[in-house]
């Protein structure tokens, strides 16, 4: 959702939910509903004015996906090698 909004030219900040929840506690807003959450998030943005999130380009996201997959395959190969070694010694 954040990337789709960003691609539409809408400034967006992706923030950790903990500080927003802490603001809710300070404002004694313990109840949680979508409407209350929306108001709290808006209030947090107004008070804190977090910087806009910088998103990776589609090429960078694709590269990250490939790097992640490569690391998974390396881990799988290592596990298989260790399993074969272990079965030979048993």
Image (cartoon, rainbow, N blue to C red):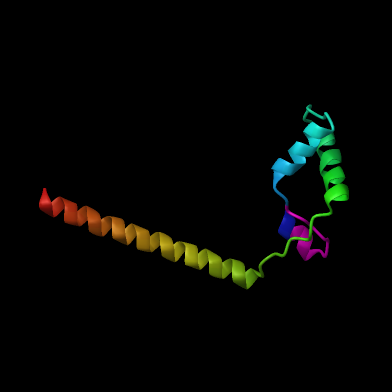
What stretch of residues is rendered in magenta?
4-14
User: What main secondary structure does the magenta stretch of the protein show?
Assistant: loop
Q: Position of residue 73 (x, y in %)?
A: 38, 62
- Magenta stretch: residue 61 in it? no
Count numbered badges in the picture. Answer: 0
Residue placed at 83% from the left, 45% from the top?
44
84 lies above or below 63: above
- The one of 5 and 15 positioned closer to us in this rendering: 15
Furthest residue toward bottom:
59
Which residue: 24% across, 56% down?
Answer: 82
Q: Quadrant of residue 75?
A: bottom left
Where in the figure is residue 36, as x and y percent of width and height?
83, 34
Relative to residue 2, is residue 43 drawn left or right?
right
Name the spot of residue 21 as percent of width and height, x first: 74, 37
Looking at the image, is 49 positioned above or below residue 7? Answer: above
Q: Is residue 85 above or below residue 64?
A: above
The residue at the point 84 percent across, 33 percent down is 27
The residue at 48%/67% (across/down) is 67
Q: Residue 20, image x and y in percent?
A: 76, 42
Q: Residue furthest front?
A: 26
């Amino acid at each position: 959702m954040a990337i789709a909004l960003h691609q539409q030219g809408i400034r967006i900040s992706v923030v950790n939910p903990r500080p927003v929840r802490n603001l809710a506690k300070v404002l004694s807003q313990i109840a949680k509903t979508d409407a209350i959450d929306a108001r709290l998030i808006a209030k947090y943005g107004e008070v804190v004015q977090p910087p806009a999130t910088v998103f990776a380009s589609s090429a960078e996201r694709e590269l990250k996906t490939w790097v992640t997959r490569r690391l998974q395959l390396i881990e799988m190969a290592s596990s298989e090698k260790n399993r074969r070694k272990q079965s030979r010694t048993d």
